[in-house]
Amino acid sequence: MALLLGIDTGGTYTDAVLLNDATGAVIAGAKSLTTRADLAQGVGAAMDAVLERAGVAPASVDMVSLSTTLATNALVEGQGGRVALVLAGFDEGDLARQGLGEALAGDPVIALAGGHDHQGRELAPLNLDALDARLAALPAGLAGVAVAGQFATRNPAHELAIRDLVRARTGLPVTCSHELSAALGGPRRALTAVLNARLIGMIDRLIAACEGHMAARGIPGQLMVVRGDGALISAAVAREKPIETILSGPAASIAGAGWLTGERDAMVSDIGGTTTDICLLRDGRPAIDPRGAQVGRWRTMVEAVAMHTSGLGGDSEVHLREGLAGGLTLGPGRLVPISLVARDFPHLIHNTLDLQLARTLLPDGVGRFVVPLFRTLPPGLDERETAVAARLLSGPVAETDALKNRVEHSALGRLVARGHVLIAGVTPSDASHVLGRQSDWDAAAAGKALALFARQSRDNGQPVAADAEGLARAITQQMTVQTTGALLQAAFAEDPRFAGQDAQALADHPLVVAALDRHRGAVVPGLTLGVPVIGLGAPAHAYYGAVADRLGVRMVLPEHAGIANAIGAVVGQVSMAAEGQVTSDGPGIFVAHLPDGPERFGSSDAAISALRAALQHEARNRAREAGVGDLHLSETRDVNEVAVQGRPMFIEATLRITASGRPRIATGHL
């Protein structure tokens, strides 16, 4: 019997589950709070709790596997470390494409002549001396460097030369775009490399926390990590390519949903603290998004499940909607629930809220607190950021005390974006505590914070709600409305009948809203989903009953819905792929774009054979490094030819070799 330990680290909770590999039985499950300031605390607490509940010795665990929503949440919330981007062979206009300039958010760019053409031929020499001088001028506090060269997937020579020099001169982690995707589309590859570089520090800290606790407790074997397409990769690969872990948690939840329920066709909706992730399950398999994973504003080149992610969760920020009609909206940003921060800092939270409730006039920022994730001032701060951060060195403070003037709001926003601080405020989780649907944290503090929020004035001069309970009901009702909208939007996007149409516009259509509102007039519209909904995540039980009623659909809430991601983390396979192309450089000349650079052949068959051998070698090596014992190779080939005077003319061939298998566990069994 092999014992498998699955861990899922989300924005609010870290879940752990112990699974019997032979029988598929869940032996025990446990939760702990995710500790952003020191991830090792939350990870260790979850691992210790599940081992204690199961009565299992750490040394008897055969494999540990991790899924996480941290990378997804960071991109949705615009967080991550500062980076630099080195471009070779691109022009200034490329920064405006695919949101690359927006993703950089003012971080430094070094543009160099260089790059290659579509056949892998050098466009211009690479000036490494100029790069060396520019590297010396980079600001302090960078988390990594992204490198992108024009047509680097056809010839990576310039990216590799830049990588070697950057590593030698800065010591920083370097992400090369060709290592993340074999597809063309330079600006989007550059975007993917930038996002990867931003995430390296965060994912490295998480993996180090897991491996450190495994070593401390004597848990044998290697650590595996769930990739965005649901496959497992080694921790070493995840450290280098953290971008591949975006949608890791959601991908694991799909695997967990199918395993827990046995449903073959369903909408899987996984609500966490920060996001709601929705995927259509058909014949037991989630679809892979052919365009690359999209998370928040960013369309990446990362292969992942066709997941529809919205910034809606139990810890979403509650906003007042502008206009005379008023109302509320939730997300996409995340706050620490007041009820949670009050559990750890009860005197600060209750005393501050009591003083604010006694006031007649309420300034901006009441009911909100700033929680630092540092003990010493972070490097690379400007003057205003330093001033705000210095007020947090002793711990959390009320937002009204953290900011001395309005111009410091933007400085606080930058500290949040870089992951240095968190903001605590009113969330749906607080509303659930007020209504008695949750009892994990401090319900009294939640009630005070909601009472303060309810006293705010709408544009028509009326208060937001009569009292804390009235506001709590309004928040949960808005959660139902937005969750229903997210499910419908995902359903429209996946239904071939509506291909090419705006799924959000369809979900917001007046006829759709009228059907959901049960309108009965001269027109009686009706609408539901054609498949059941599987509700996952710790908050699902608090909200999804009302969602099922509004949609008129069967809702499946499995027994272990709150730890489905952790279950999914240990039921997958390792799958490592290598991809390359063969192109034609003229009559009788065929170029195989090998991992080490282009090589020319006299026939397409010879070029494809050489490429196949190189890709098989690379895929095998990657799989074995990931800990696969018995592996299986599969091949897909796409040959593009056109007819010229009735005869086929070769244009391009794309070859993909995939090596897959179960990870080798500590006992040596598969």
Image (cartoon, rainbow, N blue to C red):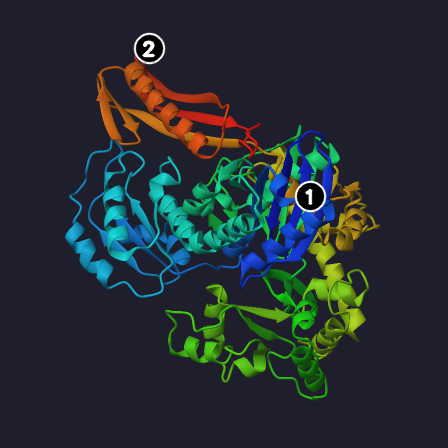
Q: Is residue 529 visible?
A: no
Give the residue at x 75% y 38%.
532
Q: How many marks?
A: 2
> Please, which residue is most extreme toward the right here?
520
Q: Residues within 10 Å of mark 2 (few under 14, many from 20)?
A: few
Quadrant location of residue 141?
bottom left
Front residue of this view, candidates 485 and 621? 621
Residue 61 lies left or right of residue 562; in this view the side is left
Amino acid under disc 2: Gly
Mark 1 residue element: loop
In the image, 392 versus 645, the foreground residue is 392
Image coordinates of residue 441 in percent, x first then y, are 73, 66
Q: Is residue 55 above or below residue 399?
A: above
**Residue that label 1 marks:** 56
| Res. 531 image quadrant | top right
167 up-or-down from 358: above or below: above
Residue 461's x, y, as percent?
70, 80
In three-dimensional space, the C-alpha distance between marks 2 and 1, rounded to whole angstroms, equals 70 Å
Whether residue 340 is visible: yes
Q: Is residue 548 left or right of residue 37?
A: right
Q: State the SS at label 2.
A: loop
Circle 2 residue: 646
Give whichever of 304, 489 is nearer the camera. 304
- Residue 18: mark: none
Q: Earlier in the sequence, mark 2 or mark 1?
A: 1
Q: Nearer the viewer, mark 2 or mark 1?
A: 1
Asked which quadrant contains residue 23, the reply is: top right
**Cβ atoms at labels 2 and 1 below 8 Å apart:** no
The reply, left or right, for residue 505 in relation to residue 379 is right
Residue 556 x/y as whole percent: 77, 41
Q: Amino acid at mark 1?
A: Val
Seen at 60% across and 62% down, the residue is: 334
